[in-house]
Amino acid sequence: MIATDRNFFAYLDEMKIITILLPLSYHHGLSSSFSMTNDFQEHPLKIIEKRQIDNKMKYICELSKDYSFEKQYMIIDEHGGKTDLQIGAVIRTDAFDEKFYYDGNDLGVTFQADLTWFKLWAPTATQVKLKLRPSNSSFSEIVKMKREDCGVWSVALNRDLELYQYSFLILVNQEWREAVDPYAKAVTVNGELGVIVRLEKTQRPRPNLPAIENAVDAIIYESHIRDFTIHPNSGVMNKGLYLGAGEHHSKGMDGEPTGLAYLKDLGVTHIEFLPFHDFAGIDELQRNHDYNWGYNPLHFNAPEGSYSTNPADPYSRIHELKKLIDQVHSLGLRVIMDVVYNHVYVRETSSFEKVVPGYYFRHNEIGLPSNGTGVGNDIASERKMVRKFIVDSIQYWLEEYHIDGFRFDLMGILDVETMEEVRKVCDRQSKQTIIIGEGWSLNTPLPVEKKATIANQAKMPQIAQFNDKFRDSIKGNTFNLFDKGFALGNEHYKEAANEVITGSIGFTKQGSGAFNEPFQSVNYVECHDNHTMWDKLLACLPDNDDSLRMKYHRLATGIVLLSQGIPFLHSGQEFFRTKKGDGNSYRSSDEINQLDWERKSIYKDNVKYIKGLIQVRKEFSCFRMRTSAEICAHTRQLPLASPLLGYWFKRDDNEIIFLINPTLKKQAITVPEGDWAVLVDHDYAGITGKRVLQGNEICIQPVSINVLLKK
């Protein structure tokens, strides 16, 4: 029953509300009655509202019986004209969510005894078929699927289907669409089809890692799998690949460690990789022709193929990603996965839109897809089956790949309840799982109080957020290349800097801060986005020499590492990473994006300094206090002349003074009486005192941080 010539249009917009649009060119848009039929029975509709909109007459009609989503209906008007009843805005109603929520854990492909089960949640479909193809054949087999409860379609086949390629054919609104399984765990080249794999063949034992008692004990180092090793002098064999990022014994031109061994020596605890779930933007068979950060998600549960040695082998990317993670773990480090659940690459061609059109994405007040992400679509995480997908996906990466933490891209698009469910599933796996996210408030049609933003941090107390106030007050506004922050000598940022250095908890002012607890604040001045700190300094200080720029850079990075909260470093930040002035390198060349390991050798003194700061942070708990109460109890601010900042910590039988001089002059500072060992000054950082100062007045160098330990 297909309406090839529609006289008008009809949409199911609520469970019992049908909207009918009659063109004025059709009987002047007038009809006194409508009915609904599915060939066997006709049901009259009650017209409850009628009004003209542009060149159409709009009728709101009420259905007296329950609508069955299993059937296809026609709408007939008083003139005998007819049209098919299409699924409309009903999919975005709470009633639809309640009726079709499915809590099973078997969507996608599962195995049971000698059976291979296929299940797809497609409640608005009137038919669904499974399309199967052997990996070495062009012949496809079509298998009908059966509708079950909650809008799930299923079929079980009693044969060996390993490495078969598959997709689903879905009939919605009398239009057939072919879609890759949203739950696909393996895919063909460029994610064109799902692939059936036996994941037990790829299993690796779960590692035992040293405990991370609190998120503030973490030191996060962000990198991109390709950037990390692609440089000609990285010393890595498998450059730009999972296997390369996992190599342990690579050395640079200077004979010193690069790659993972270098990170282990540097002292960081977590490496955060930009997205490695399957993404668009690179032809996997010609991976060196293009570059992409990976924020174009295609398939959320399958690894990206351009980082594997053989993208045509569905097992290759799985084995090699797992090996990379194992290699990181073997050094006692952890992996944070950058996840992009806030949008898809192209809404219209995504599996979500093909399987249940209109459900997975937010729409604005006039029914158009919203665009808070800036890429044309926003994932509607507040809907039950969207939330379930995100939580199921997180659980899958935790269990199958042993991921240790997640960085949520544009987390402010998602809702608080979804993020709290993510926290729960992570806690069930390990309470040491770190969750961090970009809690920016974006223009998406979700009530303000439900957005997973910094403003709602109290509703997500165990989820940390990138602290843009820290970033902008220390280095200067990230969207104004020429704005100088506190670390660049701008004393107008002094009070803001004072607040973020002490954890953004309201320590320096009456009332609350941005966060209730320090472990909610991710402190950073540089990440993959926008200009590197070095490039910003080149723009801000065009008439100064590199020696001063290096001092400012060192000061800013030092503040990141010694402030209360979670420190976050961009890879190469410790050797003044440059992208040659490119402020948005998401698809720029390797020459722009690569981690230049030669700079590590050139600026080895700064690398040594940053390594020393990391040791100081790890050794002395006063730089990573767990709660706001601890910070308030153990911190006293020193009364220094502006713009200097100073703090006196008394904790764990230690007395420590932390001083910051962002000015271009030496500064004489009065400190409490005693003998003070210098752990950090303008050119030294370490847990062994460089020298001992006596008396109560010291002189600190321009543009420097200083840490003194009472003997």
Image (cartoon, helix red, strand yellow):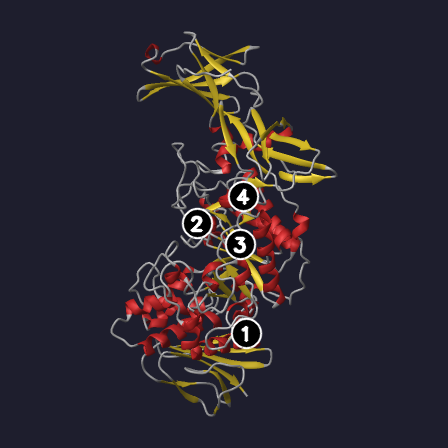
Disc 4 or 1, which lies upstream in sequence? 4
* Image quadrant occupied by the C terminus: bottom right
Mark 4, Cα crowd under 10 Å, few <14 / some 14-19 / many 20+, is many
Report which residue position mark 3 lands on. 308
Q: CA distance from mark 2 to mark 3?
A: 13 Å
Report which residue position mark 1 lands on. 265
The dot on residue 188 is 4
Nearer to us in this view, 522 or 242: 242
Q: Position of residue 380 (x, y in %)?
A: 49, 40
Report which residue position mark 2 lands on. 282
Disc 2 or 1, which lies upstream in sequence? 1
For the residue labelled by badge 3, is the local secondary structure a helix, a strand or a loop?
loop
Nearer to us in this view, 71 or 206: 206
Q: Residue at x 29, y 77 (%)?
A: 545
For the residue labelled by badge 1, is the local secondary structure a helix, a strand or a loop?
helix
Q: CA distance from mark 4 to mark 2?
A: 14 Å
For residue 419, side relative to residue 52 (left or right)? right
Disc 3 or 4, which lies upstream in sequence? 4
Disc 2 or 3, which lies upstream in sequence? 2
The reply to whether residue 505 is visible in this rendering is no
Query: What amino acid type should be assigned to the residue bearing mark 4?
Result: Thr
Q: CA distance from mark 3 to mark 1?
A: 27 Å
For the residue labelled by badge 4, is the local secondary structure a helix, a strand or a loop?
loop
